[in-house]
Amino acid sequence: MPLLNSGDQFPELTITTTDNQRLTLPGAFAGGFAVVLFYRGSWCPYCIAQLRAFERASDALAGHGIRVAALSVDDKETTAALLDKHKLTFPVGYGADAHAVAALTGAFVNPDPVYLQSTGFVLDPAGNVVVSVYSSGAIGRLVPDDVTGLVGYLREHAPSTTA
């Protein structure tokens, strides 16, 4: 399971949301920057804090053209309850096959019970990884301010396309 590095194409990954929509990443977010978050589960206070932080930052993220999606191994009912309780408005997928996702992305998997460790990716408009953040435990994850700062920097320093 190789880790995804800066410049690597993000692999095709389809997530199903609690409202029965299917998003295939990175294509669903093509043309804009994106954040893809894998979280341990609705039982994890650090994960909840991260998801809530991205929700609170939704206006700032949208202002930078950044879309967010999250995914866990939680079942549909647990994920729906999480969305409702924390008023999350970005797509959150459920029922991830932790080992299959890990094989695609290099995410770490907890052995028992099986779940994905916190992993985050910032993708560019072409679906390439700008930054990957892998955690092997409860802490160590992307935060919205870092993402908006990075995307702002990248846009400011993008090569000119005028001839």
Image: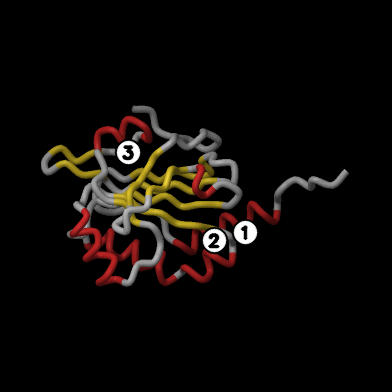
Q: Residue at x 54, y 41 (%)?
A: 127
Nearest the viewer among 1 and 15 is 15
Q: Residue at x 71, y 49 (%)?
A: 158
Q: Residue at x 55, y 52 (%)?
A: 33
Q: Position of residue 115 (x, y in %)?
A: 20, 44
Q: Which residue is label 3 attached to?
A: 107
Q: Earlier in the sequence, mark 1 or mark 3?
A: 3
Q: Are marks 2 and 1 in contact (CB under 8 Å)?
A: yes
Amino acid of disc 2? Thr
Q: Is residue 134 above or below residue 53?
A: above
Q: Dot 2: few (<14), some (14–19), or many (≥20) neighbours within 10 Å?
A: many
Callout 1: helix, strand or loop?
helix
Separation (CA) of disc 2 from disc 3: 23 Å
Q: Which residue is label 2 attached to?
A: 148
Q: Which mark is residue 52?
A: none
Q: Is residue 91 left or right of residue 154?
A: left
Separation (CA) of disc 1 from disc 3: 26 Å
Amino acid of disc 3? Ala
Q: Earlier in the sequence, mark 2 or mark 3?
A: 3
Q: Is residue 49 above or below residue 38?
A: below
Considering every residue shown, the one lying at the far top of the view is 1
Image quadrant in which the N terminus is located: top left
Q: Which mark is residue 152?
A: 1
Callout 2: helix, strand or loop?
helix
Q: Position of residue 112 (x, y in %)?
A: 11, 40
Amino acid of disc 1? Gly
Q: Dot 1: few (<14), some (14–19), or many (≥20) neighbours within 10 Å?
A: some
